[in-house]
Amino acid sequence: MKHLRRRTLLISLLSILLLLSPSFANGQAAQPRPVKNIILMISDGTSLASVSLARWYQRMLNNDSIHLAIDPFTGATVITFCSNAPTGDSAPTASCYLTGMPSITGFIGTYPYDAGANNLVPVSADLAYAPLASLFEAARLERGKSTGVVVTCQYPHATPANCAAHHHKRGNFPLLAKQMAHNGIDVLIGGGTSYLTPEDSLFLKSQGYTIIFDNVQALRSDKSQKLWSLFNPKQLPYEIDKDITKYPSLAESTRIAIEKLSSNDKGFILMVEGSLVDWAAHANDPATLAKEFLGFDAACKVALNFAKRNGETAVIITSDHGTGGITIGRGDWPRYSEYSASELFGQLMRYRSSAQVVASKIRETAPEALDSLFQAECGYSLSDEERSMLYNSQHYSLSPIDKKKRDNTSFKPHDKSLEYLVSTIFNRRTPISFSTHGHTAEEVWAAFYHPQGDTPHGVIFNTELHRYMATLLGYPEGLGEISKKYFVSHTALFPKAQFAIDTVSNPSTPVLTVKLGKHKLLAYANTNRITINGKGRDLASLIVYSSPTKTFYLPKSLAELLK
């Protein structure tokens, strides 16, 4: 009974937070003043300890660099969670930032299903799996602003997809990529050449876009205002491994995006993600994590400097959840306060490549040459125990031990991949420790810049962070009415029509047929394309099909076209 009362109290509290405008308990101004431009910067999977590690890493590189670019603007923490679980996942946590509604693991811009007693917020079962309008859609469709996405992962990954896509399976990259191509992202710079199909590339070009694949010089010299510049079939390399003659830094990509988006007199909204901080934390790779965050911090500096010069721009910098359970210090380094900075971080500075790259080299390295490889990459030779770990790994094909006789019992949780195992070896030589390869539930940090100083502070909820940004955009009551305007179920939109849904002829683009009187409408899911009585036209907004509910979602304005 006590647990039930606690849960009821929590849901009641969160209900109030979802309904109220951003008048936080810490006493900040209830209505932050709207701005012309919004830059949202998300360092994926970054706990406060990860930020601390990056700051020390920077200081070890230059003793005068004792602060990060975000430090003067950091003043809040954010409680992030899924609608049914305290531990966040990038899909529903970014979805909450962008739509205002916490959701379920894997859900992209989509209303959660009712999880019963596990709900942490009120959930309407009638809205399950319905698309939710994002800040990007509101900015573009209602305010006429330009939109941009800059990432280091493949562009239809969870966080960027939440800007302009809606689906309940974050892993359905082809579907998410198609939706993003048809949802008006003016500037996109990131990874994922393999996800932009020839068909969608032709569509973008027909809309006046420049498409650049794997050409950093072309990116740097491009003068167009609508640009998609993609590198690698999937993600970009880590900062620690990156060849700057082949790839842009996140800071450079951010600068280019801002320059292009700034040409719109009505303003812009830009999301920049330090995507691979999370990936390094999943791998428990500390040096790679630190350098990856420093790359993100450099991008924050670009955004902050622009905002301060521009005078009409707000910058929101945060993370979506913790990853890795990182600590600086552990039990087998018992003299905690007696270690110098060199003793704590010296070995960290010697790692020349990510565990991912070292693992790829190990796959091609004979056992007798492993010591030379580790000397070159890490500055030390393997211990007998570490050599035994590699020999007994299920992922080292050149091991002198027959695969059937290998025993990885003592380190099996870290033998998920050779990259994970290499990180484990890295961490044996440092006081950096990780408790998990997964996500963690602690609140995350946040930093803000607003030209009039209207910024949150203290401890806030993810729902409040969204409402703050919605208010900056001119929607202090949230985006509920925007969702109702652009995502109406086909049965509610055309209550007297006959319907047919075809998911077989072209599975990537289900088709809704609507017959109403003398009119016949065809709506193509995951695009903005319709035909009415045989004549094609492009809508301003995206057409979404929810397979769990067998429902199409269409803009309210379509009802007028069939009268």
Image: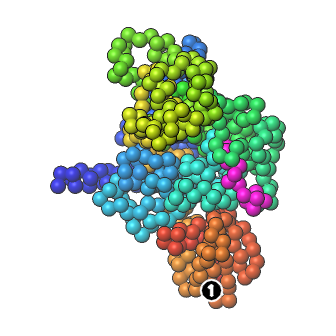
Residue drawn at x 34%, y 57% is: 119
Residue drawn at x 54%, y 32% is: 400
Q: Which of 36 and 304 is in front in this view?
A: 304
Quadrant of image for the N terminus: bottom left
Q: Which of 11 and 268 is in front in this view?
A: 11
Asked where in the image residue 507 lies, by quadrant, the reply is: bottom right
Residue drawn at x 57%, y 69% is: 545
Residue 220 at what x, y percent from top left?
79, 36
Q: Nearer the viewer, residue 492 or 37?
A: 492
Inspect the magenta stretch and tell me whether residue 195 lies in it.
Answer: yes
Residue 434 at what x, y percent from top left?
42, 31
- In the image, taking residue 233 as reference, residue 170 lies left or right, namely left
Inspect the magenta stretch and tell me whether residue 130 lies in it.
Answer: no
Q: Which residue, given by chain and number where applicable, does mark 1 sit on?
A: 516
The magenta span reads: 187-202
Residue 139 at what x, y percent from top left?
62, 53
